Image (cartoon, helix red, strand yellow):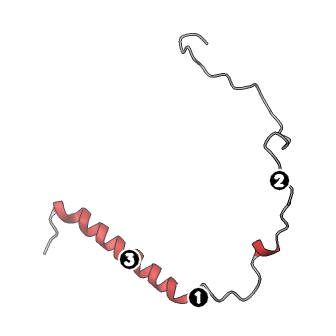
Amino acid sequence: MRIQEENRNMILLATVTLCCGAVAGTLALFEPAPGRASGKLVADRAVIDPTPRTPAEIPVRVVGAPFEPNVNPRER
């Protein structure tokens, strides 16, 4: 039995979907439960600066020529 040419794309899509679903299901079985974290998370140990800074206070370094939009494409 041969697959008709009009149906080959759908068969390929279904095959890839089933294979990816099987891989995802297998990996989900081996992944630990989301509610059972053994240690502290990295985000809990991070130090957060309590003083908010506005964008005007953050120092930036500008390299190169400033941007000027080309409003007239015929003239450079």
Measure the C-alpha gap from mark 2 to mark 3: 49 Å
What residue lies at 45% left-to-right and 83% top-to-bottom? 25
Residue wearing tag 2: 52
Choose top left, top right, bottom left or bottom right for residue 10.
bottom left
Where does the C terminus fall, quadrant-wise?
A: top right
Say which mark, if any, is on residue 19: 3
Image coords of residue 45 (percent x, y): 82, 74
| Mark earlier in primary sequence (2, 3) | 3
Where does the N terminus fall, quadrant-wise?
A: bottom left
Residue wearing tag 1: 33
Packing grade of label 1 (10 A; few <14, some 14-19, many >=20) is few
Image coords of residue 57 (percent x, y): 85, 42
Q: Nearer the viewer, mark 1 or mark 2?
A: 2
What residue lies at 85% left-to-right and 67% top-to-bottom? 47
Q: Nearer the viewer, residue 21 or 2?
A: 21
Measure the C-alpha gap from mark 1 to mark 2: 36 Å
| Mark earlier in primary sequence (1, 2) | 1
Q: Is residue 4 left or right of residue 37?
A: left
Q: Is residue 69 left or right of residue 20?
A: right
In the rendered view, would you say 63 is above or below 35?
A: above
Choose top left, top right, bottom left or bottom right for residue 31.
bottom right
